[in-house]
Image: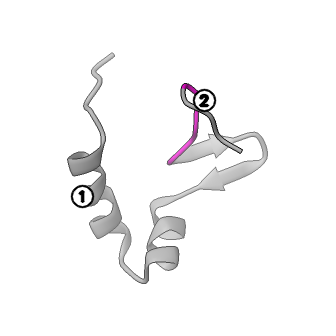
Amino acid sequence: SLESGDVVTLLGRDGEQTISPRSWAELADSIPWEVLCSFKHRLPRLVI
């Protein structure tokens, strides 16, 4: 279970698993491009 402050991986690799825009799109019955564009409205931008 998740708790406040836990780190989560939305895209990329986490251990042996890879989470891709295509994976999200299949779950949402969408396309990868739409998934990527929708992240910008929900996540703060952090430039490193």
Hey, what amino acid is under mark 2? Answer: Asp
Left or right of residue 26: residue 35? left
Q: Is residue 3 magenta?
A: no
Q: Secondary structure at mark 1?
A: helix
- Residue 6 screen position, x and y as percent: 60, 29
Q: Is residue 46 above or below residue 20?
A: above
Q: Answer left or right for 41 relative to 25.
A: left
Under tag 2, what secondary structure?
Answer: loop
Q: Position of residue 34 (x, y in %)?
A: 28, 68
The main secondary structure of the magenta stretch is loop
Q: Residue at x 76, y 40 (%)?
A: 15
Q: Residue furthest left?
A: 41
For the rendered model, the colour scheme is one colour
Please state if 27 lies on the left or on the right of 29 as rendered: right
Most foreground residue, 27 or 12: 27
Which stretch is magenta?
A: 5-10
Q: Residue furthest right?
A: 16
Magenta span has 8?
Answer: yes
First of labels 2, 1 by sequence position: 2
Q: Which residue is mark 2?
A: 6
Q: Is residue 13 left or right of residue 26?
A: right
Q: Which mark is residue 37?
A: 1
Q: Residue at x 59, y 55 (%)?
A: 19
Q: Most extreme residue toward the bottom, as rendered? A: 29
Residue 3 vertical position relative to residue 16 in the rendered view, above or below: above
